[in-house]
Structures are given as structure tokens and as C-alpha cells.
Amino acid sequence: MLAAWLSGTWLGCTEPVENEEEVPSTFSYDAPEEEGPALTVDELEDRVEQILGKVYSYDAQPMIDIYWDLIEDTDESCPAWYATDDSDYWIAADDGAAGQDTEGEQGGCVTTGATEYRGWAYTQRQDAYITEDGWTIDKDYVSALAWIWTPSGDLYEAAGTLLTSVQTLDLEQGDFVLAESRIEGVFGWDGSGLEDTWIGVGEVPDMAIETQSMLQRHFVEVEGGVSGVQDLDGLDAFAFNDFIYGDEFYCALEPSGVISLRQPDGQWYEVQFDGPDEEQDTQVNTDPACDGCGRVYFRSQEWGTICVDFGTLLDWDISPWS
């Protein structure tokens, strides 16, 4: 009876509950207003010329030289070496004595002279090596993922590739010289000796520079960029893309390619130059495009024109680093 009464009377008096559908409120986002160029056209022109004046300072050789100095202190088994005719490879196997910590990973080995090694490195060094076709090659190459601590605690870090090379061919008309400096990756050195170089001021280049010289003719090609720039007011990075420049054989007034410059807020300027590319084998100084000026774009919109003196890029004899 009670059950019937509950079902017929209590439950029967219950009104159904309607589920109200929740409608989301309208979403709105007030995007910050994008700022325009922080530099004037004249200021940008000045920054480009500053960059041209420091291109050859991104030389891999100083960091390579520090590397060779550090590995003077090695033992028979620290690190473990593997050698071929023209290259060497080492790996720092864990000997239980290493005390430094790198990204939470222990390991490595310590020499009797108290130099500590972690990681590995592959190197090639050629000194006046003569090829079968008559080239003389001087080359330094280091590819590594390595940490080396000196006995005093200075740290050398390498995560990438460093290369310098000079190749010379002796011709009847004179020497033909190809020179190259290449920095790819991230490197560090907190010891002394490099205070005035890119590594000492905290810049991070990822750049390849190649030059040619023959019969007083000069040519340069630059690819890559630099971040962490400190001495360009209003900018913190720059890059070269397909940048090629030669003397009167090409266009002595203007290169081909793009120079990009970044503001600290992440916005970029791009300067497009119209000189000839390396496949063009005719003299083009009379071409109207060979005028020394480039079109400037800001946020992909054409913004102005700058005219630059590129002479500093060819102000060397055999190579920029000799």
C-alpha cells in the first residue's frame, strides 16, 4: 500500500525539470595595436652599413684555436681516441671520476691533469695539403657535442660545426684563392682570450661566408644570420639570404639577395638588392638595376629605399682573414 501511495501520489506530483541550455557568451579579443617601424629609413641605411662592417668578424677560427689548446691535456683513455689518416674522433666514456653536471647528466672522464671531458668531437686538420689537381688546402674542422672544463673551471661548449678553409691554386696569371668560415650551432667559452669576439659579447651566429680572389677580382657570398646582437641600436638580429657580391665583373655597386633586420619586438625589415647572381657571367655595371640601392619592406609592405656603400666587403687582398 505504501509503495502504491508513494508511486501514485508522491511521485505523481513531481513536476518535470527542464534542462536549460547554456549559451556561451560572445568571445572578444582586443589585439594589441602593432607598432610601426622603430627606425627611420636613414637609420636603417646606417644599420646595414654597420652590419657590412662586421660581417668578417664572424670567424670560426678563434673558437677552433681554443679547442686545440684545450685538448693538449689528454690521457691514454681520457678521452678515448679513434684516428684515421686525416681525421680524429674522441668520445668521453664514463670513468666515474667526472664531477660536473650537464643538463642533469653525469658521465665523462677526467685526465690526470684535471681537465674534464664530456660528449664527443670529430675533427679534421689539413696544413698545406696538396691535392692531385694542384690545390693547396689549409683546413680546420670541428664537429662536436662536447663540454670541456679546464682545471680552473672554465667551460668550453660546442653543439655544432666550426670550419675554416683556404684553398689556393697556383695559376700562371696568379693565385686563385677560395676562403671560407662557417659557424653552425651553439658555442660557448667562459675563459679568457675571446672577450672582443662574437663569442665574448654573447652573439650567436649561424652563418657561412665564402670568398674568392683572383687577379685582383673579389667575390663574396654570405648565408645565414646572427642573433643576440648588442651594438645595433634598435635591432637584435640580422640575416643574409642568397647574398652575393662581386667587383666589376658583376656589379661593383650592388649585390644580389636580401638582408633582413629584426627589431626587438620581433618585426622584420627586409632589404632586397638587384645585383646579378653568381650564374650571370657577363659584365652588368651598365644595367639600370646596378645602382647600389635596395627596396625596403616592413611587414612585407614596401616602405622605402636605401642606398649603401658595399666597398668594405671587398676591402681585402687574399682573403678577409689573412
Image (cartoon, helix red, strand yellow):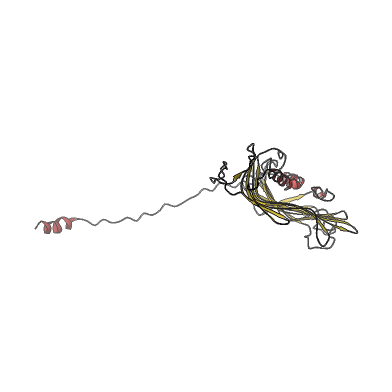
Q: Quadrant of residue 111?
A: top right
Residue extending furthest front?
76
Residue 94 spot, x, y in % from top left? 57, 48
Residue 5 spot, x, y in % from top left? 11, 57
Instruction: Give the camera-side residue of 234 and 220.
Output: 220
Residue drawn where x is 72% and y is 51% of the image: 304
Residue drawn where x is 80% and y is 60% of the image: 131
Instruction: Give the camera-side residue of 7 and 136.
Output: 136
Q: Is residue 254 above or below residue 112?
A: below
Q: Quadrant of the N terminus?
A: bottom left
Q: Is residue 43 above or below residue 218?
A: above
Q: Is residue 169 visible?
A: yes
Q: Is residue 59 visible?
A: no
Residue 292 spot, x, y in % from top left? 80, 52
Instruction: Give the camera-side residue of 200 and 298.
Output: 200
Residue 165 spot, x, y in % from top left? 76, 53
Q: Report the side of 14 relative to 22 (left or right).
A: left
Q: Quadrant of residue 283?
A: bottom right
